[in-house]
Amino acid sequence: MNTEVLIVGAGPCGATIANLLGVYGVRTILLDRAPAVIDYPRGVGVDDESLRVFQACGLGREVHADMIQNQALIWFDSNQTKLAEIAPSGQPFGWPRRNSFLQPMLETKLRTGLERFEHVQLLLERELVGMRETGDGVEAHVIGADGTEETITAQYVVGADGGRSTVRKLIGAVLEGSTLGARWLVVDIKDSTYHAPFSGNYISSKRPFVSIDLPFGYRRFEFRLNDDETDEQMVRPEAVEKLIRTHFNWTGPMPGLERSRVYSHHSRVADRFKVGRAFLAGDAAHLQPPWFGQGMNSGIRDAANLAWKLAAVVRHGAEPGVLETYGQERRGHARALVELATTLGRVYGPKTMAGEKLRSFGLRAMQRIPATRDYLLQMKFKPMPFYAEGVVLDPSPKDPVGRMFIQPDVELPSGERVKFDEAAGDWFALVGINTDPADHLDEESLQYWRSLGARFLRVNRSRAGSHMLSAGSETVVLDDVQGGFRDWARTRADRDIIVIRPDRYLAATCTSSQANSMTRRFSAVLPVKTKTLTSK
Ligand SMILES: Cc1cc2nc3c(=O)[nH]c(=O)nc-3n(C[C@H](O)[C@H](O)[C@H](O)COP(=O)(O)OP(=O)(O)OC[C@H]3O[C@@H](n4cnc5c(N)ncnc54)[C@H](O)[C@@H]3O)c2cc1C
């Protein structure tokens, strides 16, 4: 068998990459050694950045329909007195920022989504056991559940094969970091009648615990285990029931136990995300404790970052050098989230009663000061990705270049109101704010954007009048119906041309008079074979 991209591991990260490559038209094989999606208790919190990626897969509304939206996270002390709340408002990227979901249900929808693409194959019960790089590709050695051996050749291989990644071992990459000492019992119950419509984290020096409201009557509980409690003892239904009754004052009948498992937590990041033609993504590349609900979300960011770069090389003639920017752009942010999740774990699990009191005092004090209350409430402590190097032109920490671009609603010429990405298309977008970007480009620049497959968009101020509607035939005219571009441009009025990448990160901005020089400089950052422009 032969393919352009082989993805090992059909968990949420691998299945998302496969969907994106499906959208981009790349021939892809996705394989998984298991016969079905993993049914352990795992991810329950998904953020707006991931939802935007699922939207790019063409599955945003479908997967979001299964989620509880805008779910607050509340921190309590061990007496169950509220200390602080995280409930971010606003939807800068077009989706609610905190949502609870069931990972097996999401994964099933991602896999079903692949059926839309004739050029994407999902092969189950196939285990990658070996791999060798040839001059122009990779030969992967795969064994089926019945013992059949086969070789799959591919131009590139992505190891999205989880924390114990075979690909990681085969390419010699190493996970750096540590495994934390504590063990946690994680339990999902079904048909829950317990009414607590939020995620609750209970800070305690004796036994920190967690309770999370999940869709369709499910509820998640997590309890830190003590050293004298064995895994076998504590996963038993009687032990689980006792923990739930004790900690939640639960007197009614006990609902069904759906899944339970004991986990240790890891804080680890791979030393490299790419070796030759092989890449690591998702848990194969980084592992974090679940305290900020960002393990899978980090993997979805990897998926969005890597998929378009692979497609740019395989489909659009981009120089393979762009693939080096994957690790450059992703590794630092993945590490920042691992560190934040590890710190939060320390906050939840104080070692002594004095530590517990100190945390309660600190969080209460933060609630009294509007600025610090807002810092927690609006989740301003979440590190947002910023690409200081990679496929970006002149990024700087105080600038929007290198960051995810906003997603306001816009109105199509038909009068239909859509989320911006639906109008922008699946790929690069060259956007003029109140101007047609094509009007400012010479033939050579136009040729570069066309060869890259960029879409030209003109976003007009809302209800601007018919004189604003003219644009070249290849430019889509949009109405800034929600005022999102107006507000974004308020402090950046001179920069009316912007370049948005397929993963919706802002790659470049300039004034319309700089459109050609910007294009020339950008073509050096993302050279497309035989079409790199000469600087003038
Ligand atoms: C208790 C708990 C709570 C969590 N909560 C959250 C949360 O709220 N939010 C969040 O974002 N994340 C959360 N996570 C983390 C999240 O579940 C993981 O980060 C996510 O599942 C990783 O996805 P992945 O696709 O990278 O890997 P996985 O889901 O592990 O998938 C890897 C796949 O690769 C396959 N595979 C492995 N080796 C091979 C091979 N050699 N050949 C073929 N196939 C192979 C496996 O069968 C598997 O299907 C939580 C995790 C736990 C344990």
Image (spheres, helix red, strand yellow):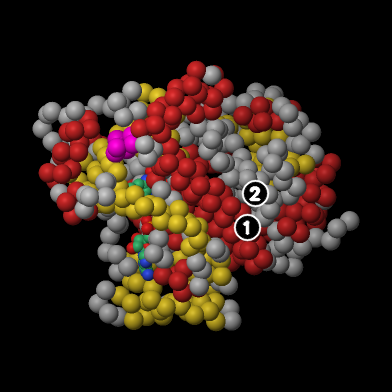
Mark 1: secondary structure: helix
Residue visible at 67% across and 55% down in the picture: 390
10 Å crowding of disc 1: few (<14), some (14-19), many (20+) = some
Residue type indicated by callout 2: Tyr
Residue shown at 44% from the left, 24% from the top: 361
The residue labelled by disc 2 is: 387
Q: Which of marks 1 and 2 is nearer the N terminus?
A: 1
Q: Quadrant of residue 312?
A: bottom right
**Residue 266 seen anywhere in this rendered image of the structure:** yes
Residue projecting furthest to the right: 536
Q: Do the residues labelled 1 and 2 touch (CB within 8 Å)?
A: yes
Segment colored magenta: 204-211
**Residue 422: horizontal and vertical position, in percent?**
53, 41
What residue do we see at 67% from left, 66% from top?
321
User: In percent of the image, x 50 and y 32: which residue is there?
Assistant: 379
Which image quadrant: the N terminus?
bottom left
207 inside magenta stretch: yes
x, y percentage for residue 54? 45, 46
The main secondary structure of the magenta stretch is: loop
Image side of residue 260 versus residue 444, left or right: left
Q: What element carries label 2?
A: loop
Q: Along the horizontal axis of the image, is 497 left or right of 253?
A: right
Q: In which quarter of the image is residue 125?
A: bottom left
Say if disc 2 is inside 8 Å of ligand 1.
no
Q: Residues within 10 Å of mark 2 (few under 14, many from 20)?
A: many
For the C terminus, give its image quadrant.
bottom right
